[in-house]
Image (cartoon, rainbow, N blue to C red):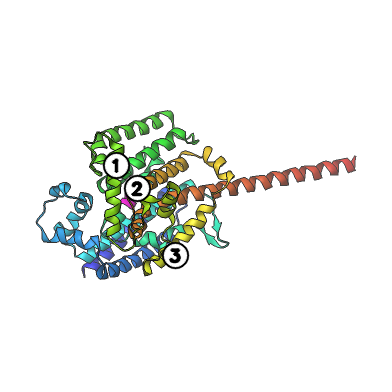
Amino acid sequence: MGIVVLLVVLFFLNEQFYRRVVVRHPFANIGLIRKIFLWHLLFTLVYYLYAIANPSDSKQYYDVLSKLNIGWMDTITMTNWGVFFIAHPFVTVLDFSYEMSMLMFSWFGFVGFVYTYLFFGENIKEKIIVFGRYDLMTLLLFLPNMHFWTASLGKGSIIFMGIMMFVYGVKDPKQRILTLIIGGFFIYCIRPHVMFFVMVGVMFGVLFGSDKKLSGVTKFLIVLSGLVFIYMASSSILAVANLQNSENIVDDFSEFALIRSEGLSERAGSGVDLSSYPLPLKFFTFWFRPLFIDVPNVLGIFSSIENLIYLLLFFKICNQSFIRFIKKAPNVVKMSAMIFLLTSFAMTFVMSNLGIIMRQKSMVMYFLFFVVYYYLADEKIKKREYWQRMEANSNERVLQESRELIN
């Protein structure tokens, strides 16, 4: 009964949410968003069945909160405090069951997809068809691996929602300040270092993007806010790798990365020795593996299919035209590219388990997709404008020839 009641409440919340979305974004297809919700619910069930049969952090989070008498503020001192802090009111106060907690956090993941849709939709107006027949927007919003890792009680759903809320808010910080604050809080409480990468990416995009819609004052305030945050949160960010008291951050981080990598490798049988890989191969492994030659389990087969899609999309920007495009790209594109590269760079030094890689990269791959999507849309616009000019010139020549014949 608890699940049924929660589902009714969530459907009601969704309808209120949809109305606000339509008012602010007329381009939004509510029918599509409803399908995303149902698709995400399916993966909530899939992940739940997976968690029953396999070790899952979600069960540990729930057991700690349900069996121990922990005060809400006491969760701040715990390891992975962000998950415990956010889950505490639901588990301890509202007495949610494990299944209800999974559904609640899965809903957070769904909200992340809605903001992903809005982030893409308000910045890219062109419809792009890939692989001969598929609408790129629809394809990206229904990627199974992305839904699987954001459909449970844990870090994935929260940080995905936080990241997408934050980058959506950057588009219009004055009107979306509350969205920025909420999104930033969710990112920071789950992974402070990712918040650092996001802030650096935002500042890079603001400073070096070609978009002139942001005023000089707004740019200054964004950069100033970013620098203030980085300064105030520096201890928390460094504490992630126990570097807050380090005298040689580079060497100590290298040691931390090696220990962390070895630890993750031992957690499952899908370890890969990234420490011996050159940097380009580290990136390739993080972005596009497992592929079919890896396939650690049944889940790996589906992930391999999805990773092949990632790889094919990536190939679309492997040309000189993209280099010219990125040099003159607007701030949202440069922001997305920087967040993607910075986060990928950091993750490659501590990831050595394909299962962990599949889960971790779900929070950054949409930034690559956004860059690819924007580039393809820009190319489509350029081609259309080129043919329009050719048609105009052709019509002008016909008119000129007609005048000469009359004369």
Q: Are marks 1 and 2 in contact (CB under 8 Å)?
A: yes
CA distance separating discs 1 and 3: 31 Å
Is residue 162 inside the magenta stretch?
A: yes
CA distance separating discs 3 and 2: 22 Å
Q: Name the residue rendered at 43%, 35% in the picture.
A: 206
Q: Which residues are magenta?
A: 159-163
Q: Name the residue rendered at 39%, 43% in the picture.
A: 342
- With 59 as the anchor, is 383 left or right in this view? right
SS of the residue under disc 3: loop
| 313 in relation to 184, above or below | below
Residue tagged 3 = 293
User: Disc 2 marks which amino acid?
Assistant: Phe
The C terminus, quarter of image: top right
Residue tagged 2 = 349
Q: Which of 33 and 160 lies nearest the eye of the viewer?
A: 160
Nearer-N-terminus badge (1/3): 1
Classified by dominant secondary structure, the portion drawn in magenta counts as helix
Q: Position of residue 365 (x, y in %)?
A: 41, 52
Q: Residues within 10 Å of mark 3 (few under 14, many from 20)?
A: few
- With 166 as the anchor, is 9 left or right in this view? left
Is residue 350 inside the magenta stretch?
A: no
Q: Position of residue 393 (x, y in %)?
A: 74, 43
SS of the residue under disc 2: loop
Q: Are marks 3 and 2 in contact (CB under 8 Å)?
A: no
CA distance separating discs 1 and 2: 9 Å
Residue tagged 1 = 253
User: Disc 3 marks which amino acid?
Assistant: Ile
